[in-house]
């Protein structure tokens, strides 16, 4: 069953059990002066981008066996329109030590799936009713009217996280995380911005990109 597409809704994060000291922060531009005003620390960067047909082969071509460590939490998107929730889960799941996730259904889900495979995690999400209900509730609370479940969506969410000294792109449609080279907690935002610019360069006339950061709100 397809889910209703999710807007970039900061309150959704807190409904998942993320403490209010962390929030989804808008990134207004990828130049250094605009990145500098984003509160730190930044734990994850989420990119919403259009997926025209001509880029699909690029996406598929990067899906290959990798040497990604087991410490990177990555899950399959097997549910249409669930990419926003999966991007947030990727951001949270790879920062549990820092976030101190509150007890609740997401913490339980991550505990139960941490030893499972990429495919098995995606299958579990299909039956995670409390996460599904929270997604649907947040989708209908967005600033614009929620589209129907069967509406074809041409935008996609992906997440960038720091793990063990590397920048990983996490996309539920890709078989493996994509390693984009070295990064640190301090340089994560700048390094992720560089990759976001690469996505934008694929179609210089396209303007429908949104970047947000999971960052400190204190």
Image: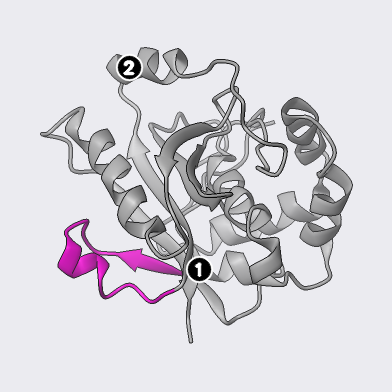
Judged from the image, the secondary structure of the residue bearing numbered disc 1 is helix
Residue under the point 38% across and 76% down: 39
> Which residue occupies the foreground of this view, 12 or 181?
181
Judged from the image, the secondary structure of the residue bearing numbered disc 2 is helix
Residue under the point 47% across and 47% down: 160
Residue 201 lies in the magenta-colored region: no
Q: Residue furthest left?
A: 205
Asked if the residue at tag 1 contacts the one at tag 2, i.e. Cβ–Cβ closer than 8 Å, the answer is no
Question: In the image, 127: left or right of 76?
Answer: right
On screen, 32 above or below 217?
above
Q: Could you say where residue 32 lies in the image, as x and y percent from the top left?
A: 18, 63
Question: In the image, 71: left or right of 60?
Answer: right
Residue under the point 41% across and 75% down: 40
Return the residue at label 1.
10
Residue under the point 61% across and 44% down: 86
> Which residue occupies the foreground of this view, 122 or 186?
186
Looking at the image, tell me whether mark 2 or mark 1 is earlier in sequence order: 1
Q: Could you say where residue 10 lies in the image, as x and y percent from the top left?
A: 50, 68
Name the image quarter holding residue 153: top left
Mark 2, other Cα within 10 Å: few <14 / some 14–19 / many ≥20: few
Return the residue at label 2.
53
Q: Magenta residues?
A: 24-40
On screen, 188 above or below 41?
above
> Which residue occupies the foreground of this view, 178 or 49?
178
Name the image quarter holding residue 58: top left
On screen, 73 above or below 39?
above
Q: Could you say where residue 91 lies in the image, as x and y percent from the top left?
A: 57, 54
Mark 1, other Cα within 10 Å: few <14 / some 14–19 / many ≥20: some
Disc 2 to disc 1, C-alpha distance: 30 Å
């Amino acid at each position: 069953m397809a889910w209703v597409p999710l807007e970039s809704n900061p309150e959704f994060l807190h409904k998942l059990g993320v403490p209010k000291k962390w929030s989804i922060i808008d990134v207004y531009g990828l130049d250094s002066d605009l990145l500098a005003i984003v509160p730190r620390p930044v734990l994850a960067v989420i990119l919403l981008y259009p997926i025209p047909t001509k880029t699909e082969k690029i996406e598929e071509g990067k899906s290959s066996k990798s040497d990604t460590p087991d410490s990177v939490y990555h899950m399959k998107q097997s549910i249409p329109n669930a990419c926003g929730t999966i991007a947030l889960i990727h951001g949270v799941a790879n920062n549990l030590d820092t976030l101190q996730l509150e007890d609740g259904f997401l913490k339980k889900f991550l505990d139960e799936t941490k030893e499972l495979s990429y495919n098995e995690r995606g299958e579990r999400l299909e039956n995670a009713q409390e996460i599904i209900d929270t997604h649907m509730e947040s989708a209908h609370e967005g600033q614009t009217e929620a589209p129907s479940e069967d509406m074809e969506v041409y935008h996609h969410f992906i997440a960038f996280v720091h793990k063990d000294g590397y920048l990983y792109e996490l996309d539920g449609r890709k078989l493996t995380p994509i390693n984009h080279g070295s990064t640190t907690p301090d340089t994560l935002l700048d390094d992720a911005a560089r990759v976001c610019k690469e996505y934008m360069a694929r179609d210089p006339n396209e303007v429908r990109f949104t970047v947000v950061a999971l960052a400190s709100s204190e």
